[in-house]
Amino acid sequence: MRVLIVGATGLLGKEVVRLLSPEHQVISASRNGPDLSVDLTDKPSIVSMFQQVGTVDAVICVAGAAKFAPLESLTDDDFAFSLANKLMGQVNLVRCSVGHVTQGGSLTLTSGILSLHPVTGSAVVGIVNAGVEAFVRSAALELKGKARVNVVSPGWVSETLAAMGQAYSAGIPAAVVAQAYKRSLVEDITGQVIPVKKS
């Protein structure tokens, strides 16, 4: 399959590329990547990316940012940035994929554990993650027969925790998280929130 991976140069993106490359033709896209460039906050940039890539069998998005900060310190701009980036960026990725994904192709987005298990500082991230999951459930109904749409909900990633000075063992390694994206790609499922749990 021709698989477009948005966010291919990030921590999870690199692992997804590594996992899928032996069996699929992987096309990498990212904000500052060496292959295709895309800015999720800019819809024309997404349109341009699809025009360059042509037709693909699947799109996997492991990109998108949201502000993590205490509620009392969050500004209107923090909310606007997060909603435009990780939420509407992924929504527009699906909207713009119509006509560029083969019949019955696969679209996979990314949410996160904070939609269900909030912590201090996760107000905006929780909104965004829950919004992505709600969108996927609805989009799967409307795209039935045209494309499958799922979302992977990673827990805390081990490498991210380690970079924050916390215990690597408290998270899930990025290579394990990548397996959930492969599941969304190859299994005949749609409208699903795919959790990533410690084995």
Image (cartoon, rainbow, N blue to C red):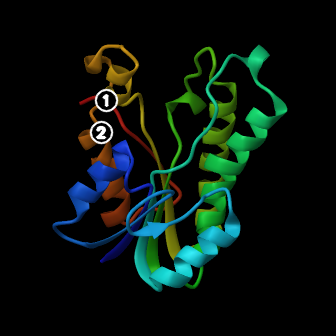
Q: Quadrant of residue 58?
A: bottom left
Residue drawn at (35%, 45%) of the image: 12
Q: Give the residue type at disc 2.
A: Ala
Query: What residue type is disc 1 on?
Result: Glu
Disc 2 crowd, CA 10 A, few/some/many (<14, 14-19, 20+): many
Quadrant hosting residue 24: bottom left
Residue at x 66%, y 40% (from the top left corner): 128
Q: Residues within 10 Å of mark 1 (few under 14, many from 20)?
A: some
Using the numbered discs, state the Cα–Cα distance from disc 1 to disc 2 in whole angstroms. Answer: 7 Å
Q: Position of residue 171 (x, y in %)?
A: 33, 24
Q: From the image, tell me which residue sits under label 1.
A: 159
Query: Quick one: 159 or 109, which is closer to the camera?
Result: 159
Q: Is residue 179 left or right of residue 163?
A: left
Q: Nearer the viewer, mark 1 or mark 2?
A: 1
Name the residue beneath numbered marker 2. 174
Q: Is residue 133 above or below residue 39?
A: above
